[in-house]
Amino acid sequence: MSETRRIAALFDRVAPRYDLLNKLMSMGQDRKWRARLVASLGETGRGRVLDLGCGTGDVTCALAQNGEQAVGLDPSAEMLRLAREKAPHLAWVQGDALRLPFKAGTFDGATSAFVLRNLPDRKASFAEQARVLRPGGVAAHLELVRPAKGWQRALHGAYVRVVVPALGLLSSNRQAYRYLARTVMLVPQPETFAVEMGEAGFGEPRVERMAMGGVAVVAAAKRE
């Protein structure tokens, strides 16, 4: 089984309570973070927007509500089933972020929320995003990250190691949420994502930290 298929199977298992647990783990802040993600596209990233790893479709729906022509893509069939129930009028595609099933220059923008740390090969995904975006199109990514230093980093580490797996009991799949907690502890700083996006063909990135440095949005436009 490929790494992408393995991760998709994991998210199939947690899908039924994924939205509830997101709200609990973010202490109700997830909607505000998604709004910042959508806003980070700016005017140049608006139009037809691809939401990578769309899960149950919250970001895709937020993009559509903002007036974008949104397309949600995810490898998990169960996540997509729930997304279609939320918004049957939107386009939902089962696919791999490392091999996007779209022609070059198809989109004006691309987004993801809490996806980068789960990708088997981020650089390949950034290259694929650059391929399917038009010149000047914006890619924006929302991710859980570790605060850079200080008491915020210590508090964040304790929360991720203890609280996140405990909340996973509500999903009847504690092992899956142990995996998710582990990926957060290992995730690079957002500046690393910015460098990787630059190597894939994106210009100078914007990095915005929230939640005492534990959440970040990284956005950059494809070079002309």
Image (cartoon, rainbow, N blue to C red):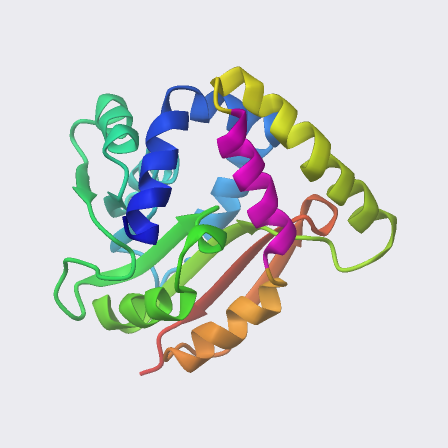
Question: Is residue 179 shown in magenta?
Answer: yes
- Identify the residue at horizontal 41%, vertical 27% (top origin): 14
Q: Is residue 10 above or below residue 135?
A: above
Task: Report the magenta residues as a range.
Answer: 174-187
Q: Is residue 146 above or below residue 206?
A: above
Q: Does residue 16 appear to the left or right of 207 in the view shown?
A: left
Residue 220 spot, x, y in % from top left: 45, 69
- Identify the residue at horizontal 29%, vertical 52% (top origin): 2
Q: Is residue 28 visible?
A: no
Question: Is residue 205 shown in magenta?
Answer: no
Image quarter (top left, top right, bottom left or bottom right) of the C terminus: bottom left
- Identify the residue at horizontal 37%, vertical 60% (top origin): 43
Q: Does residue 52 appear to the left or right of 113 in the view shown?
A: left
Which residue is outermost to the left? 103
Image quarter for residue 158? Answer: top right
What type of secondary structure mainly makes up the magenta span? Answer: helix
Residue 105 spot, x, y in % from top left: 18, 70
Q: Is residue 142 above or below residue 64?
A: below
Give the tally of numbered discs: 0
In the image, 4 versus 191, the foreground residue is 4
Which residue is outermost to the front? 1
Image quarter for residue 75? Answer: top left
Q: Does residue 200 appear to the left or right of 73 in the view shown?
A: right
Q: Is residue 50 visible?
A: yes
Residue 100 spot, x, y in % from top left: 21, 59
- Identify the residue at horizontal 57%, vertical 35% (top origin): 178
Q: Does residue 28 appear to the left or right of 93 in the view shown?
A: right
Q: Is residue 97 above or below residue 5?
A: below
Residue 131 spot, x, y in % from top left: 24, 72
